[in-house]
Amino acid sequence: MEQTKNISRRSFLGKMGAATLVTTGLSACGPREQNNTNPLVPEGEMTYRVNPTTGDKVSLLGFGMMRLPSVGGRSAREGNEPIDQEMVNRMVDYAIEHGVNYFDTSPAYCRGLSERATGIALARHPREKLFIATKLSNFNVYTREASMEMYQKSFEELQTDYIDYYLLHSIGGGTGMQTLRDRYIDNGMLDFLLKEREAGRIRNLGFSYHGDVSVFDYLLSKHEEYKWDFVQIQLNYLDWKFAKDINPRNTNAEYLYAELDKRNIPAIIMEPLLGGRLSNVPDNVVKQLKQRDPERSVASWAFRFAGSFPKVLTVLSGMTRMEHLQDNLHSYSPLKPLTDEEFAFLQETARLMMQFDTIPCNDCKYCMPCPYGIDIPAVLLHYNKCLNEGNIASSQQDANYREARRAFLIGYDRSVPKLRQANHCIGCNQCSPHCPQSINIPAEMRRIDEYVEKLKQETL
């Protein structure tokens, strides 16, 4: 059913019976409610997909090592706490016991410590039974020397002499084609990686895509030459048809998947929960999902959506806590593919969610660290949370103005330390070029700070 463009947020919440539609994130897929059903996950039931090029039998659930737990229990991407290696080992062991064999990391994850932690955890298991993925994450220094050093260090950190799946990391960002040329082509790194694949040190070569679709199309047009073994894309039931509406620089997943499908290139999926937005949906939708399948979590519907496409090789989930892992294992042990009716229901849910003008931050933290100490994702996510809860008031005449003002200001100080709030942004714009969603971060910081100052100055 087509929704009107000018439906009010308050009206939408009333229709859906929702108290919240929160946008936060503790894992690469964001937080979700704990699965309050039987936590025991069946062993030997994992769904696998076969890579048509290499014959690799890959678990449909891939372990994203992007937000490994810190010793304080948070994601190691936040703050300066060291990675809790013991907990990482336990989660990796549990994942492998339940059929997971694909582990995705990067030199950029967890403040540069993810590859080492991943290597330690995986070295305790037979190498030939695992698929390790990492990336050339040369975001800041494009020289051949620096890129080669990063490439070689990955082998050392991961304690391996070959990489199963190696990616050109986040192509399409920056200035699009020029950045692609600077990072991979003009410095000879793509030619080098192709030779490394020939030599067997790379088993599968591909790329992850964000941003300028012309770069995606260009690399696929070179498929006969490069012979991509896989491509990593952002796919979920909101981005399927609405990615470009969320951000004009993004591309609908429906198009990306179709382009890979016609070339028989396996797709690896990132952001199945879109930074947590698809695990925190309106209460009425939660009720309907639970009525359809009371044994499954809200998050599992998004994972089932991503996994139901036959050319999807694996779906990545960055998991900070054991309950994240257990819930995701339930979703794919085994996969229960969506019916046509369920697919249509999720698309209608996406249309309703699109009535919210949230900032498309997925809490990936590629914008961090800010040289001026601002916690950029925390600022954006607090704004989104208040927006989705109806706690953004435009004037004192709004019926809920007093309540909304209090909720925003108190919540802001609780979720973002004062020295890390938006008012410290000077507009240096070191952050925006690294944002996969192409958010104009300085403009958003300025807008949010002006709103905060307006709330502080207005008397009731």
Image: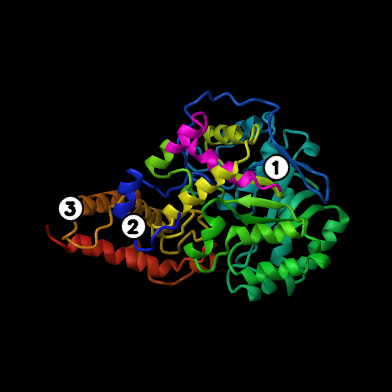
Do we see residue 65 in this rendering?
no
List the residue tagged with mark 3: 402
Does the magenta stretch mainly form a helix, a strand or a loop? helix
Residues marked 1 and 3 touching at CB (< 8 Å): no
Sequence-wise, which precedes: disc 1 or disc 2? 1
Residue drawn at x 33%, y 57% as measured from the top left: 419
What amino acid is at disc 3? Arg
What amino acid is at disc 1? Tyr
Q: Is 411 located above or below residue 41 in the figure?
A: below
As measured in the structure, the alpha-carbon distance from the residue carrying label 1 to the one carrying label 2 is 40 Å
Q: Quadrant of the N terminus?
A: bottom left
Q: Closer to us: mark 3 or mark 2?
A: 3
Tell me the number on the disc at residue 102. 1
* Disc 2 residue crowd, few under 14, some 14–19, many 20+, Cα 10 Å: few
Q: Position of residue 429 (x, y in %)?
A: 46, 71
What amino acid is at disc 2? Leu
Q: Secondary structure at mark 1?
A: strand
Q: Is 194 located above or below residue 29 in the figure?
A: below
List the residue tagged with mark 2: 419
Q: Position of residue 224 (x, y in %)?
A: 82, 66
Q: Is residue 16 left or right of residue 36?
A: left
Sequence-wise, which precedes: disc 3 or disc 2? 3
Q: Closer to us: mark 1 or mark 2?
A: 1
* Disc 1 residue crowd, few under 14, some 14–19, many 20+, Cα 10 Å: many
Range of magenta residues: 288-310
Q: Position of residue 147 (x, y in %)?
A: 70, 64
